[in-house]
Image (spheres, rainbow, N blue to C red):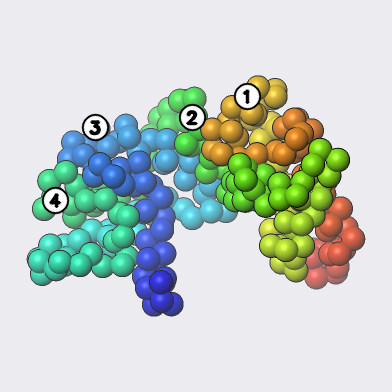
């Protein structure tokens, strides 16, 4: 993907994340149906917004941008889908796509005012949005056939795999990445308070903890991140408020 194409694609990433449940089947024309189907992702985006992620207003704006692109695309009868619209689903009735996207945008803007919006029990798809850093590292390094397993035995502790990840993939940008990773470790421990629920959740997402139980692995993972910060990135005056 070229630099320009890369920018075009990711300028609508918030809309793409919201609409992901309908990527393969298309957006339903019926408002009640898509409201129900988008509820888990909306809740996930709402929680992310309160963690300084993109706001629902930004997502709504991206949905309207997608609607405008679909309008132009349909009017011109182009054979090739614009890069920005890749993996953004059309409506079941394709010509209604701009209207459906604008209806969803209006709904997203008003969603924060909906009573009972957080009463539902979150499922794995929804909760997975809370762990973007862990999802990447625990799939690549500790998932099935992960890098941390190459040549590894039970005598080689998982802590070495964590240090390998930090040194190879994160350092020297640790100030930006590791504190959030530590937070995700402890958020997982707060959400899933026993080994069975931790294992079911992370295994469902193809994440691994090596040979260690999750209740031991996650605190160890967080501590390795903290140890690296203390050793290589001690607090400086620029990081401390006056």
Q: Nearest the camera: 217 or 61?
A: 217
Q: Which mark is residue 32?
A: 3
**x 84%, y 57%: residue:** 228
The residue mark sitting in front, 3 or 4, is 4
Dots 2 and 1: beta carbons under 8 Å?
A: no
Residue 85, placed above or below residue 130: below
User: Mark 4 Cα within 10 Å, few/some/many (few <14, many 20+)?
Assistant: some
Residue 169, placed above or below residue 185: below
- Please tell me whether mark 2 sits on a helix, a strand or a loop: loop
Question: x, y percentage for residue 198?
Answer: 65, 29
Q: Which mark is residue 94?
A: 4
Does 226 sit left or right of 149 as displayed? right
Does 203 sit left or right of 163 as displayed? left
The residue mark sitting in front, 3 or 1, is 1
Choose the circle earlier in sequence order: 3 or 4: 3
- Please tell me whether mark 4 sits on a helix, a strand or a loop: helix
Distance between the Cα atoms at labels 2 and 1?
A: 12 Å
Distance between the Cα atoms at labels 3 and 1?
A: 32 Å
Choose the circle earlier in sequence order: 2 or 3: 3
Distance between the Cα atoms at labels 2 and 4?
A: 30 Å
**x 41%, y 41%: residue:** 42
Distance between the Cα atoms at labels 1 and 4?
A: 41 Å
Dots 2 and 4: beta carbons under 8 Å?
A: no
- Badge 2 is on which residue? 123
Residue 86, placed above or below residue 185: below
């Amino acid at each position: 993907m070229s630099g320009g194409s890369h920018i075009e694609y990711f300028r609508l990433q918030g809309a793409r994340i919201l609409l992901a449940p309908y990527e393969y089947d298309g957006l339903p024309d019926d408002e009640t149906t898509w409201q129900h189907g988008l509820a888990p992702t909306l809740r996930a985006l709402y929680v992310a917004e309160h963690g300084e992620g993109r706001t629902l207003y930004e997502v709504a704006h991206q949905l309207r941008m997608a609607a405008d692109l679909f309008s132009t695309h349909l009017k011109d009868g182009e054979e090739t889908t614009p890069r920005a619209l890749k993996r953004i689903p059309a409506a079941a009735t394709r010509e209604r796509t701009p209207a459906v996207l604008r209806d969803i945008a209006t709904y997203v803007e008003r969603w924060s005012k909906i009573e009972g919006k957080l009463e539902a029990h979150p499922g794995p798809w929804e909760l997975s949005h809370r762990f973007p850093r862990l999802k990447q590292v625990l799939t690549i390094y500790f998932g099935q056939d992960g890098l941390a397993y190459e040549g590894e035995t039970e005598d080689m502790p998982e802590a070495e795999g964590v240090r390998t990840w930090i040194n190879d993939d994160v350092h020297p940008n640790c100030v930006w990445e590791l504190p959030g990773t530590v937070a995700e470790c402890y958020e997982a421990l707060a959400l899933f308070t026993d080994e069975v629920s931790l294992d079911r959740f992370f295994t469902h997402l193809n994440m691994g903890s090596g040979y260690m139980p999750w209740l031991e692995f996650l605190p160890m993972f967080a501590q390795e991140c903290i140890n690296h910060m203390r050793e290589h990135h001690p607090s400086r005056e620029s990081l401390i408020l006056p």
